[in-house]
Image (cartoon, helix red, strand yellow):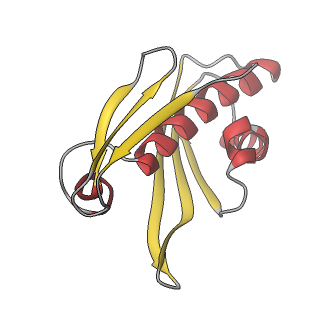
Amino acid sequence: MNRVGSARWEGDLAHGKGTLRSASGAVSASYSFGTRFGDTPGTNPEELIAAAHAACFSMALAADLGKAGSTPRAVETTATVHLEKRDGRFTITGIDLDCRVSVDGLASESLRAIADGTKEGCPVSRALAAVPISLRVATV
């Protein structure tokens, strides 16, 4: 199984512009220096990484909870990707996952144990393991 995305950049870094898209066409957006390193409205690679991580973690946690006999009504995850300048270069320095789960009959300690396993095992977490990933999980 392969998933494909593509991007095109035109111009220099500060004044150029780019477009990105998924092969399926479900995602298509423009990006720029301002959307990535400033406050200009629009998307950027780190935001897309955050969305992908949140989606993957939510699906994986739903699967892991189901395997444990506690099928959730909903799993909502927000991922925050931290981008900082290190050694003169922008670097992703960490990711925070903030997850809220709607599930009946599951003790918070059990939820935490399952979620910790999911954090280590979801495909996007595994791909991003070069940076620290924190997890906060709670029931709603």
Q: 78 left or right of 44?
A: right
Residue 101 visible in the displayed image: no
Number of marks: 0
On-image quarter of the N terminus: top right
Residue 89 at x, y percent in the picture: 48, 76
Q: Residue 61 occupies which quadrant of the picture?
A: top right
Taking 117 as reference, is 106 above or below it? above
Q: Nearer the viewer, residue 32 or 117?
A: 32
Residue 118 at x, y percent in the picture: 74, 39
Taking 118 as reference, is 75 above or below it? above
Taking 43 as reference, is 32 above or below it? below
Residue at x 21% of width, y 59% of height = 15
Residue at x 77% of width, y 47% of height = 120
Residue lying at the far left of the rendered structure? 40
Residue lying at the far front of the rendered structure? 11
Residue at x 36% of width, y 25% of height = 28
Q: Nearer the viewer, residue 52 or 77?
A: 52
Residue 59 visible in the displayed image: yes
Q: 54 left or right of 84?
A: right
Q: Residue 12 occupies which quadrant of the picture?
A: bottom left
Q: Nearer the viewer, residue 38 or 20?
A: 20
Q: 79 left or right of 123?
A: left
Q: Residue 125 occupies which quadrant of the picture?
A: top right
Taking 12 as reference, is 101 above or below it? above
Residue at x 81% of width, y 20% of height = 67
Residue 76 at x, y percent in the picture: 48, 31
